[in-house]
Amino acid sequence: MARVPTAVMNLIHRFPRLPQALTRRHRSGTRPPAAPALTPGARPRPWVRALGLVAVVMLGAWLGLLVVGNVRVPVGPMDTTMTLRPSFTGGTKINVSPLGALQLDSHIAPVRLDVNVDQLDPERARALVDHPERLSGLQDEVTEDIARGTADLAVRSCVAVVTGAATLGLLVYRRPRRALAAGGLALGLLAASGGTAYATWNPDSVLEPKFSGLLSSAPSLVGDARSIVTEFDVYQKELARLVTNVTKLYDATSTLPVYQPDPTTIRVLHVSDIHLNPASWKIIASLVEQYRVDVIVDSGDTMDHGTAAENGFLDPVEDLGAPYVWVRGNHDSLVTQRYLDRMRNVHVLDDGRARTIAGLRFAGIGDPQFTPDRTQRTGAEQSQELAGARLASAMRDQKRAGTPVDVAVVHEPSAAREVDGTVPLVLSGHLHREDTEVMRYGTRLRIEGSTGGSGLRAIEGTYPDPIETSILYFDRDTKRLQAWDSIELGGLGLTTAEVSRHLPEENQPGADRSPSPSGTSSASPSGTSSASPSGSPSGTTPSPASATPSRPRS
């Protein structure tokens, strides 16, 4: 009973106008509702109120960031969206849809920076390809873009956090003072988070990224991130000079002796293993024009992962100036194949189907393996041999039908060896090094090096991979290979261009005109010319007995 007066007194002190309200309600004839019994402990404790305020502030700040706390920033040739998100661990997450994401331990704070790469701006990217000298200032441009975007994001995030916390505080407490306190507390928390991020900032985190999605194979594809950062300046300088070197190659070939192709000769440009190197398209287009190429043959691995996101890389194929014959490599997918098959001036070879292009009949088969992550699958060698056997069977059927195949095209040499004896010449790639041999039953196997210089893998090793391609000369009447020019550009950091003329053994002076079935290499060069960056040919001629050394794959 002693609690009743205390409860009544508390009620009166909390509501001093309660008697007047009761009187008004009594006069109006309405009966007041029964009030619940209150105790002194019913009032919320201070720490409970503080926790409630913090919860309101955190929720309001998060909602504010979610609604307006992001900025769209052009970073170099890319359009990006930067956003701050609450996080227990901090750091930076870069999303490259649909390839995956990479995370950087850039800072320790309760906020994380999210960078979404929305798209590659085609005009800015094309400007870099057409004017590679601009790459020298790309690093500074990207740094300025990021700094400007981060400053804009900081201002926008402050406004979003304060507005969100204050608005939610006003809705919950219905008191302007509480709403202002919520906004001030949110601003203080954001400032403290920013200060913590600044104090713990780790610029070396870019050297140790964590990959996810399809990008999880990136470390195995491009090597140690530290070597990429340290060698990127070399890549910038080389890319600017690469196309200049190529434009001088035709002048260098004027010193090549013995074989002089006439205007009726069918000229085939053999490329392989481009691996997403955009410089390759400039090189190919230049060679097509300089050598008056009739047809381009690509023996696969044009891509790296074979995703739909990479398909835009193939668009220049339509404008290279010659028909494009292509077979699928182990880094190319059926998505890639379907995209190319729909393109004008492209001829996709698969399942042994034959096409007559520029006076030559080609047949080929796509690589049965799809291994963009460079894994070794059980039974890979057997599947290659089976694919080669299918191609050989299809070409025997073509011969019986009176339409023999002149050139077979596959990706891996192990599949190419299965067509020995069914076709005069088979072209392949995959090994990232150039080689030629006449197999046991008389078929010549021509393995092309990497026309993309192994793509991003060019900077994995101590010595960069060269960019290799070749021009094949065919007699228009016999459809037989008469000679070929091996073209090699120095890899990253090198500024040399070399052209070497090779003759089949049967076409060398005084030799038997029938191809040798010895199975040994028959690529004896009869002339070599080197072009310096200025393009002046040195005209050096090695001994006919010397052979172009094969470079092991890196």
Image (cartoon, rainbow, N blue to C red):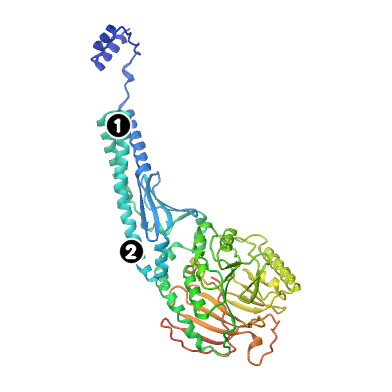
- Please state if 142 lies on the left or on the right of 333 as rendered: left
Above or below 225: residue 249: below
Q: Which residue is mark 2?
A: 140
**Disc on the earlier residue, 2 or 1:** 2
Closer-to-camera residue (162/123): 123
From the top left corner, tell me how far across and down residue 490 is, in percent. Answer: 47, 77
Which of the 4 image quadrants contains residue 61?
top left
Which residue is at 63% across, 89% downward? 508
Residue type pointed to by label 1: Leu
Closer-to-camera residue (481/529): 481
Q: Which residue is mark 1?
A: 170
Above or below 120: residue 524: below
Which residue is at 34% across, 56% downward? 146
In space, the residues marked 2 and 1 are separated at their CA atoms by 45 Å
Determine if residue 195 is in view. no
Determine if residue 109 is in view. yes
Which residue is at 67% across, 76% downward? 406
From the top left corner, tell me how far across and down residue 36 is, in percent. Answer: 35, 13
Q: Which mark is residue 391?
A: none
- Where's the N terminus, which quadrant? top left
